[in-house]
Image (spheres, rainbow, N blue to C red):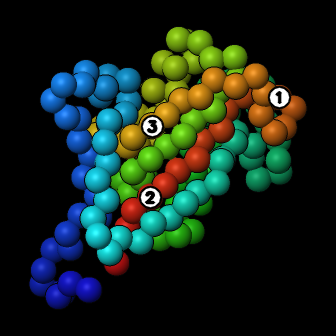
């Protein structure tokens, strides 16, 4: 625990090591280093369904809702998007266009700060009929 007048040390740092291309234009970082004694929060895959379990037919709207759902889950654990160190993204029928949509919606939800590490996995189908996008996350919080 830190003294009230001391600033808490960051729970993690995001890095893009020399020798690897700069991934920032694609909305992620290559490396997240989590500090010792950090509390980890694991968020299950969040799809684009609303509270009534309804899915919009539009990919962008599903991404936007899934990122909102992710924020809701993070808040329930006392975390925020700034605490996310790792995303895993599943996209049905992945295309370059869908990658750009995801990037724009990620920027909208996470802001302009460096983005967490991320793995995007193209898939033929997800859990629900009509589901086009899913995102899971790991967040790190200072204890």
Quadrant of the image containing the C terminus: bottom left
Q: Can residue 61 be seen in this snapshot?
A: no
The residue tagged 1 is 130
Left or right: 109, with 3 as reference point: right
Identity of the residue drawn at 63% across and 32% down = 90
Distance from label 2 to label 1 (Cα)? Answer: 28 Å
Left or right: 142, with 71 as reference point: left
Classify mark 3: helix, strand or loop: strand
- Displayed quadrant of residue 122: top right
Give the image location of residue 89, x and y in percent.
57, 35
Label number found at residue 118: 3
Q: Residue furthest front?
A: 19
Q: First in sequence: mark 2 or mark 1?
A: 1
Which of discs 2 and 1 lies nearer the camera? The answer is 2
Which of discs 3 and 1 lies nearer the camera? The answer is 3
Q: First in sequence: mark 3 or mark 1?
A: 3
Q: First in sequence: mark 3 or mark 2?
A: 3
Q: Can residue 104 be seen in this snapshot?
A: yes
Classify mark 1: helix, strand or loop: loop
Give the image location of residue 83, x and y in percent.
38, 57
Asked whether the residues under the numbered discs 3 and 1 touch, taking CB atoms below 8 Å apart as contact, a structural biologist would say no
Pointer 1 local density, CA inside 10 Å: few below 14, some 14–19, many at least 20:
some
- The image shows residue 100, relative to residue 86, as above or below, that is above
Pointer 2 local density, CA inside 10 Å: few below 14, some 14–19, many at least 20:
many
Pointer 3 local density, CA inside 10 Å: few below 14, some 14–19, many at least 20:
many
Give the image location of residue 54, x and y in percent.
82, 41
Q: Residue furthest top?
A: 96
Give the image location of residue 48, x and y in percent.
70, 39
Label number found at residue 139: 2
Identity of the residue drawn at 35% across and 70% down = 38
Distance from label 3 to label 1 (Cα)? Answer: 24 Å
């Amino acid at each position: 625990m830190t003294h009230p007048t001391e600033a808490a040390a960051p729970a993690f740092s995001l890095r893009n090591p020399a020798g690897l291309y700069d991934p920032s234009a694609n909305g992620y970082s290559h490396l997240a280093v989590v500090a010792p004694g950090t509390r980890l929060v694991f968020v299950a895959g969040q799809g684009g369904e609303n509270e009534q379990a309804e899915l919009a037919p539009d990919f962008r709207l599903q991404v936007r809702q899934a990122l909102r759902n992710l924020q809701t889950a993070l808040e329930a654990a006392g975390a925020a998007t700034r605490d996310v160190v790792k995303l895993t993204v599943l996209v049905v029928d992945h295309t370059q266009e869908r990658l750009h949509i995801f990037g724009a919606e990620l920027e909208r939800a996470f802001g302009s700060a460096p983005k967490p590490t991320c793995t995007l996995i193209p898939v033929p189908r997800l859990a629900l009929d009509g589901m086009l996008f899913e995102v899971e996350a790991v967040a790190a919080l200072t204890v």
